[in-house]
Amino acid sequence: MSGDPREWEDERLAAYDEAAAELCACVTAAYDGPGGWHDRIWAAGWAAMRFLEDDPARARLLLVDVNGAGRRAQAHRDRLLQRLADLLDAGREELEDPAAVSRCTAEIAAGSVYSALLGRVDGGGLERGRAYLGELVYLAVMPYLGSQAAEQELLVQPLR
């Protein structure tokens, strides 16, 4: 490496993209399994937590380091958030009137999940990820299932 900041950024973004692709592959595989949307969101959440817990350095890269790393890095992060929003947006089909909720709802929910997870990882709480997965699922499903149904997610106890 020549010491060129652009080259360093390219290397970091390549590492980010590789980690993001692996995360998306494992989350999508879990999400594409059997069951309804709600169950598939849980499956995707478990897969994401396992991925992040198994490699804290890449979890930090995906969630913490990318923030404040410039416009190009934010564009890469935004693509990852759009992938999460794609999964959440299928929640509209759970509604009596799917047109009553826009794609923007999924993007906001994805941002909320990301922000909550970012705070946990940045605060050193990644190893306890399964303990707060219910909170993340609450954020993901609340716009589609309503607050009362979403509150049930907070009662789910993690497997130890």
Image: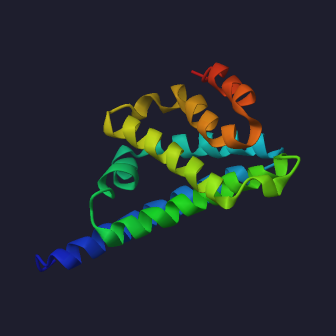
Q: Is residue 49 above or below residue 127?
A: below
> Taking 38 as reference, is 100 above or below it?
below
Find residue 84 and report its horizontal and vertical position in percent.
59, 55
- Which residue is at a point 66% across and 22% down the rendered structure image? 156
User: Furthest-right residue in view?
Assistant: 96
Residue sitting at x 68%, y 42%: 143
As drawn, is 72 to the left or to the right of 156?
left
Q: Splitting the image into 4 quarters, where does residue 98 fall?
A: bottom right
Task: Give how far across and how far down residue 56 sits, in percent.
Answer: 37, 44
Q: Which of the 4 image quarters holds residue 150?
A: top right
Check the image and tell me how it is coloured. rainbow
Eyeballing the image, is 130 above or below 76?
above
Q: Quadrant of the N terminus?
A: bottom left
Q: In the rendered image, which quarter contains the C terminus?
A: top right
Query: As drawn, which residue projects farthest toward the left?
Result: 3
At x 21% / y 72%, what residue is drawn? 8
Residue 132 in picture, x, y percent from top left: 52, 28
106 left or right of 113 in image: right
**Along the line of sight, the residue nearer the viewer: 79 or 13:** 79
How many marks can you see? 0
Front-most of 84 and 130? 84
Along the line of sight, the residue nearer the viewer: 120 or 97: 97
Q: Residue at x 75, y 55 (%)?
A: 90
Near-viewer residue (155 or 12)? 155
Give the answer, above or below, for where 76 lies relative to 97. Answer: below
User: Residue 77 in the image: x percent, y percent?
Assistant: 43, 62
Horizontal side of 150 relative to 77 (left or right) equals right
